[in-house]
Amino acid sequence: MTTIKNMPPNAKLWVYQSNRALTNEEVTEITKSALAFIADWAAHGASLKAGFEIIYNRFIVLAVDEQQALASGCSIDKSVKFIKELEQQFNLNLFDRMQIAYRKENEIVVCKLSEFEKLAQQGLVNETTIVFNNMVTTKTAFDNEWEVPLKQSWQSRFLRQGQNNK
């Protein structure tokens, strides 16, 4: 299995955040399904060199080395279909972009964007709170911009709003 770590810096990447932590049994089952999926994943008949990982039992990450073959619209559609099937099979929500994941001590917490804004206003999250930027689209961005302090993320605007309200 090619992991995300083994993908080249310019690999195209997708991060799917679960609305809840996955059990170890679910991780095992999803991993089996994902390995079967990426083994058959192709674009216009050309096999895609793909990577897969489940991180922190919360994030499903797919990546494609586009130096070998570009991920076409059809192949991307197949990956979205695969992720939607996982949602159904495991009763997950993997497409809700209105949820924010952040670290609270050693735990990863997921909440609605509106709740996160209130936490910032109340000072319960601050500029050093670690957040996850699931909008990254390359391996390099994933390595450098995925898990970052709030002050370095797009969510930092909530800090400014919270400060303006005091």
Image (spheres, rainbow, N blue to C red):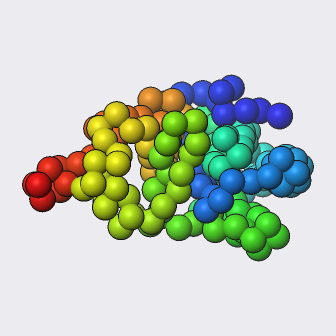
Give the residue displayed 77% in from the left and 32% down from the top.
Answer: 2
- Foreground residue, 47 or 108? 108
x, y percentage for residue 128? 34, 34
- Foreground residue, 13 or 28? 28
Q: Say whether residue 101 is left or right of residue 72.
A: left
Give the residue displayed 83% in from the left and 47% down from the top.
Answer: 24
Q: Say whether residue 106 is left or right of residue 149.
A: right
Give the residue displayed 67% in from the left and 40% down from the top.
Answer: 55
x, y percentage for residue 119? 34, 56
Q: Quadrant of the C terminus?
A: bottom left
Above or below: residue 117 compared with residue 71: below
x, y percentage for residue 75? 68, 59
- Foreground residue, 35 or 74? 35
The answer to whether residue 113 is seen in the rendering is: yes
x, y percentage for residue 130? 43, 38
The answer to whether residue 14 is seen in the rendering is: no
Q: Say whether residue 161 is left or right of residue 71.
A: left
Q: Quadrant of the N terminus?
A: top right
> Splitting the image into 4 quarters, where does residue 66 fall?
top right
- Foreground residue, 61 or 93? 93
Q: Say whether residue 76 is left or right of residue 136.
A: right
Query: So how many labels did they put on this image?
Result: 0
> Splitting the image into 4 quarters, where does residue 162 fall?
bottom left
Give the residue displayed 60% in from the left and 55% down from the top.
Answer: 16
Above or below: residue 99 compared with residue 157: below
